[in-house]
Amino acid sequence: MARDYAADILDPVAREIVTNVGIWVDREVIPHVAEYEHEDIFPEPMVKGMADMGLFGIKIPEEYGGLGLTFECYAGVCIELARGWMSLAGIINTHVLVAWAINEYGTEDQKRRFLPRMVAPEIRAALSITEPDAGSDAQAIKTTATRDGDDYLLRGQKMWVTNGQRAGVYLVLTKTDPNAQPAHRGISAFLVEKDTPGFFVGRNLPKLGYKGVETTELAFDDARVPARNLLGGEEGRGFQQVMSALEVGRINVAARGVGVAQAAFDDAIRYAQKRVAFGKPIFEHQAQQIRLAEMATKIRAARLLTFDAARKKDAGLRCDLEAGMAKLFATEICQEVVLDAMRIHGGVGYSKELPLERYYRDAPVMVIAEGTSDIQKLVIARNIVRDYPV
Ligand SMILES: Cc1cc2nc3c(=O)[nH]c(=O)nc-3n(C[C@H](O)[C@H](O)[C@H](O)COP(=O)(O)OP(=O)(O)OC[C@H]3O[C@@H](n4cnc5c(N)ncnc54)[C@H](O)[C@@H]3O)c2cc1C
């Protein structure tokens, strides 16, 4: 029986959905994850299970066939998915983020053409900002989009595209005016479809963790993209559109931090009550009680910060401060909690036969992707200083 981790936090509708996802994770994910993870195999049956539960359409409005649920519910679902396997929350992350951006900023034509197909999903979505020479500094991208009649020609190279091989549509950040000052005014986002002439998906980049889900390069060699696929139909809006969509991604990654930390904690507190050292369970040693108390407190705080950010986004407000704090805190404590769980397990914690080593390999990606911890701190600092004009 899945433990009701957020009984006192979530609204009743979200709670029921999150509980059901948790039950599914306990039954369909946790017993099988090791074989997929260690072989780095895309988890088709798990993804089908997620699709059957409607999770790919969780943030797509009902009028386009989706569930139209809240970010609060989405955050709870992502925590549960990551408690089973962080990669599952990664598989839906860019999809949900791009669907949200289309619904929020897309033209009616874009919403009608893409959103209904993203529910089942017939097509999955990826997000492509990062390039070989530009990551944190997204305004330094070099990929260009040049108008050519009814189309744009995209030219450039992208890196680290999660879901890159299996996506059917890519939200791609480009420069339509490379000389614009400030640079963000010349940035535009395009919905690039898989079969676009001149568009190529490159190799799957080998990774320390985050297995099962592919992360690829993309190449655009005068890729011919119809002008009607310019997100929102207006040039120069892409940077703001994508930064706002990244709040959705940061809620997802914060939730992943909570989920992985929770999984490590669950394993550790069970083990601490069974393993005997110096004549008593190690949980009876006060040093371990203090360690576990600190772990539980960090996870609870991270969970509350994540739901706080989600609720602000549900209210239709920008939440870069709250999502930044949630992502920063949840992913940093995840690394600490995972290492503490490994300490509690002693030597066996280092074994490849326990899931702890997977948590340990999965945790670092969360402090990097979707904006590093340093970048979250810059976002937080920019926001907090506004309240103190001098
Ligand atoms: C597994 C994985 C999946 C990913 N998936 C995607 C994806 O789907 N789509 C996508 O577009 N990208 C994706 N990324 C890319 C990811 O978002 C970037 O790696 C990340 O934003 C950091 O950019 P970078 O790697 O270029 O590092 P850099 O920007 O070069 O940063 C290197 C270091 O410098 C620090 N730094 C940079 N600027 C500052 C500053 N102003 N002040 C202080 N420190 C600074 C950073 O914090 C970091 O420690 C993924 C990355 C990984 C590893």
Image (cartoon, rainbow, N blue to C red):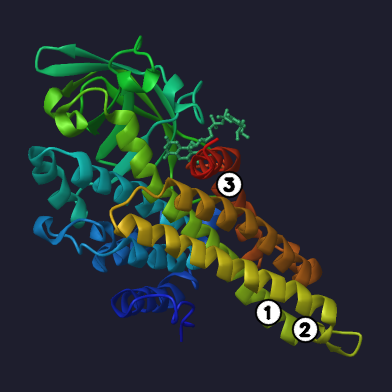
Q: How crowded is mark 2: few (under 14 residues within 10 Å), some or many (20 or more)?
A: many
Residue 236 point in image, percent of width and height = 26, 23
Ranked by sequence position, the earlier of labels 1 and 2 is 1
Residue 203 point in image, percent of width and height = 44, 31
Which residue position holds label 1? 269
Q: How far apart are marks 1 and 3 (CA)?
A: 25 Å
Disc 1 + disc 2, Cβ < 8 Å? yes
Q: Residues within 10 Å of mark 3 (few under 14, many from 20)?
A: many
Residue depicted at x 30% and y 51%: 96
- Toward which corner of the image does residue 170 lie, by quadrant? top left
Residue type, numbered disc 1 = Ile
Q: Is residue 52 left or right of residue 303?
A: left
Name the image quarter holding the C terminus.
top right
Q: Is residue 226 left or right of residue 69?
A: left
Q: Which mark is residue 367?
A: 3
Residue depicted at x 51% and y 55%: 326
Ranked by sequence position, the earlier of labels 1 and 3 is 1
Q: In this view, does 340 lie above or below 283?
A: above
Ranked by sequence position, the earlier of labels 2 and 3 is 2
Which residue position holds label 2? 283
Secondary structure type for disc 1: helix
Secondary structure type for disc 2: helix
Residue 79 point in image, percent of width and height = 46, 65
Residue depicted at x 67% and y 69%: 295
Residue 376 point in image, percent of width and height = 54, 43
